[in-house]
Image (cartoon, helix red, strand yellow):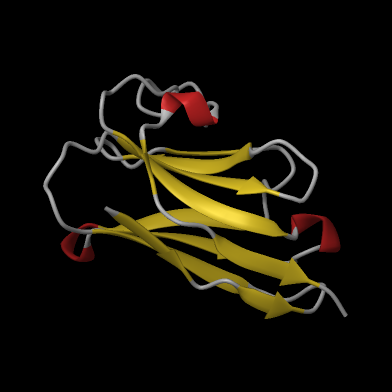
């Protein structure tokens, strides 16, 4: 089970840190991805972290502003978001790759939502003045 948290309302230029905690039944996690979906838009991959070597990948739209990291002891992955823009407003989801098939695991990039098979519930991020 994945639990995403940390969303909220923030002004443009502000920061938020999202958390994704894995709990419950043990399953292999090859990568954790962060996705977002704005109203009327398709879900897009934002970032991911490879569980094997910690390599990270980002969508061009968030590069330099978002940072993904992990705390192995806490089974938690974080998404630190800075310099937030109104266009970052969306429901944010974390998802895991339990099959080792995602581009993130093979060091190619974030990939699409079809590459991840376990999903947490979303957390709303709203950037507005």
Left or right: 80, with 41 as reference point: left
Examine the rendered structure and indicate whether residue 32 appears above or below residue 1. above
Left or right: 61, with 77 as reference point: right
Residue 65 position within the rendered picture, expressed as x and y whole percent measured from the top left: 67, 57
Q: Nearer the viewer, residue 104 or 29?
A: 29
Number of numbered discs overlaid on the protein picture: 0
Examine the rendered structure and indicate whether residue 7 appears above or below residue 25. below
Q: Quadrant of residue 29?
A: top left
Using the rendered image of the protein, determine whether residue 81 is visible from the camera's viewpoint.
no
Residue 97 position within the rendered picture, expressed as x and y whole percent measured from the top left: 33, 33
Residue 81 position within the rendered picture, expressed as x and y whole percent measured from the top left: 61, 64
Q: Identify the residue at image location x=54%, y=43%.
A: 47
Residue 49 position within the rendered picture, expressed as x and y whole percent measured from the top left: 40, 42
Name, please, the residue furthest toward the right.
129
Q: Identify the residue at image location x=45%, y=50%.
A: 94
Name, please, the residue furthest toward the left.
26
Quarter occupied by the C terminus:
bottom right
Q: Quadrant of residue 126?
A: bottom right
Left or right: 20, with 52 as reference point: right
Q: Identify the residue at image location x=39%, y=38%.
A: 55
Using the rendered image of the protein, determine whether residue 119 is visible from the camera's viewpoint.
yes
Left or right: 50, with 110 as reference point: left
Examine the rendered structure and indicate whether residue 22 appears above or below residue 107. below
Examine the rendered structure and indicate whether residue 11 appears above or below residue 2. below
């Amino acid at each position: 089970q994945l639990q995403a948290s940390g969303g909220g309302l923030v002004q443009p230029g502000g920061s938020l840190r999202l958390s994704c905690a894995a709990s419950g039944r043990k399953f292999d996690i090859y990568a954790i991805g962060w996705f977002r979906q704005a109203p009327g838009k398709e879900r897009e991959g934002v970032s991911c972290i490879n569980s094997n070597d910690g390599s990270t990948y980002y969508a061009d739209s968030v590069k330099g502003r978002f940072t993904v990291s992990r705390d192995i002891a806490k089974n938690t992955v974080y998404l630190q978001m800075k310099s937030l823009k109104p266009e970052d407003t969306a429901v944010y989801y974390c998802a895991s790759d339990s099959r080792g098939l995602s581009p993130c695991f093979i060091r190619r990039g974030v990939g699409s939502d079809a590459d991840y098979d376990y999903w947490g519930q979303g957390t709303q991020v709203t950037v507005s003045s």
